[in-house]
Amino acid sequence: MKQFFWIGTLLLASACSSTPKASPTLVLSTARSTPETVLASKPTEFIPSPTATQLAPKRYFTDNFDTAPTYWSILTASGDSGRVNILNKKGALIFELNEQNAWLYAIYGAFEYENVHIETKFESQANDVNSIGLVCNYDEQAGWYEFNISSDGTYSVLYGQWLAEGIAQYIPIRNDASERIQIGKATNEIGLDCYEDTLQLYINGKLIRKLDVAHIGLKSGKVGISLASFDETPVILTFDWVKVSEFKSP
């Protein structure tokens, strides 16, 4: 399975839009041990998703997707976004990726967090290899952390950063495999603690790794989810819920 580490133009669209903007062509890399730099454009400021009855945002919450999510921004990083459908039905947020190497983010833009726990439960409804992840400490200037698991049983932790106007970089922090990941067509739960200079990774209720990221030093930022298709499509990924809570040391 190819592991892609890259970044590209991120385009804001309304949450749950079925007609997102077109994405640019990206340079993809299979490098695992060295940083890769590609041309990119900075994203614009986050804008709450417009709704008829906009409720005040919550700092800590569990979103069961019984209604269309608000204050989430969809970022398209790769692929033809016209071949990506985002649906909200039956208490789930569903992404249908009909494009190879499509990569999306959904960022909760209402708050920034210093010590935070984020987790999600999702189902891959196809046997094709895909990726699901969590994002924390997202800051346009300083960068972000990203924890992804793949349906082939592997996972990765990345540090993404905008280097300058039009240039961005991903640096792999950790790549490994875990028997905790349910492979193929399956349901998984993943979690991520971001506090001080530490990341803690959870797969299906078990803490699998604790990482010291003091050498990077991101202290706060927004949170979100990521998802991607690879060589085979279609990929259908269903999010049952996303939970954001305050991290408290034991």
Image: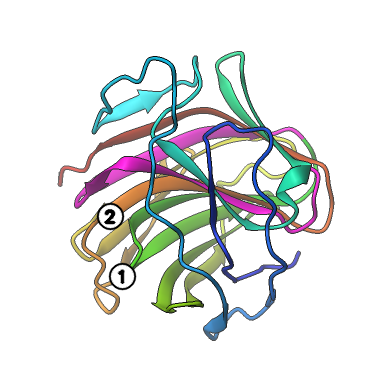
User: Is residue 115 depicted above or below 126 in this figure?
Assistant: below
Which residue is painted at 46% across and 26% down in the image? 69
**What kind of residue is marked 2?**
Gly
Which range is magenta? 98-125
The image quadrant that residue 155 belongs to is: bottom right
Is label 2 in a helix, a strand or a loop?
A: strand
Estimate the x, y position of residue 29 in percent, counting from the top left: 68, 77
The reply to whether dot 2 and dot 1 touch (C-beta < 8 Å) is yes
Which residue is painted at 49% across and 39% down in the image? 204
Q: Which mark is residue 221?
A: 2
Foreground of the two, 25 or 156: 25
Q: Quarter holding the N terminus?
A: bottom right
Q: Which mark is residue 242?
A: none
For label 1, the crowd category at 10 Å Cα-Cα, with few meaning under 14, some 14 to 19 and many 20 or more, is some
Foreground of the two, 219 or 192: 219
Estimate the x, y position of residue 95 in percent, counting from the top left: 66, 36
Q: Is residue 130 visible?
A: yes
Is label 1 in a helix, a strand or a loop?
A: loop
Residue 114 shown in magenta: yes
